[in-house]
Image (spheres, rainbow, N blue to C red):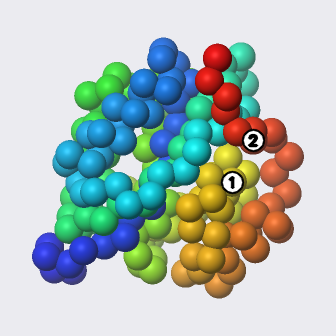
Amino acid sequence: MKGNNVHKVVFLLGSNRGDQEKNLQKAGDLIEKQLGRIIKASSIYETEPWGFESEDQFLNQALLIHSAADPKGILNIIQYIEQDMGRQRGLNFYTSRSIDIDIVFIDQLVINEPELSIPHPLMHLRKFVLVPLNEIIPAYIHPVKDMTIEQLLGHCEDDLEVKLWNKP
């Protein structure tokens, strides 16, 4: 893939440690500075943890950016941003964190490699991903499921609460 192509990249940001809103803002700023211009940003949603127990709710936000970076470059940069913001990767995959940046889509690419799976393999099972995506790209067609985000949300059986976050 040529480095001069501009890709549409969709991220989901999440935070349930520290100043969560500030963490989302800082991650968005760093993504824009290091990867490309933010074209659309969803509202911020408050969500229950998925896959593990925690008293701390998550704040989640979806971003659509344009980037000239290739998929591995995008992955390397977001992992650097996470580490720079205090994310510690351990043995337990699902855990509380200051920031989590998931690549949900890159154009219509399908990548299945040990370190990178695009589209995100579990996104269609998670309302905390689908609700913010539905706000910014409802008609986007999932390249594997062949359904729009809106359709995926309508079929999602996840019953965890996802609510628009009201600033305290």
Camera-side residue: 151 or 70?
Answer: 151
Q: Quadrant of the C terminus?
A: top right
- Where is residue 65? Give x, y as percent: 36, 60
Judging by the rendered image, the residue that carries numbered circle 1 is: 131
Q: Is residue 124 visible?
A: yes
Identify the residue at image location x=70%, y=39%: 164
Horizontal placement of 150 versus 89: left or right? right
Task: For label 2, count other residues whose C-alpha is less than 10 Å away and answer few (under 14), some (14-19) or many (20+).
Answer: many
The answer to whether marks 1 and 2 mark residues whose Cβ atoms lie closer than 8 Å is yes
Horizontal placement of 65 versus 42: left or right? left
Q: Which mark is residue 99?
A: none
Horizontal placement of 69 versus 161: left or right? left
Q: Which mark is residue 162?
A: 2
Q: Is residue 51 visible?
A: no
Above or below, 121 against 107 in this view is: above
Badge 1 marks a residue whose secondary structure is helix
- Where is residue 95? Give x, y as percent: 57, 28
Residue 6, by quadrant, is bottom left
- Amino acid carrying mark 1 in the image: Val
Horizontal placement of 110 versus 168: left or right? left
- Where is residue 115? Give x, y as percent: 37, 56
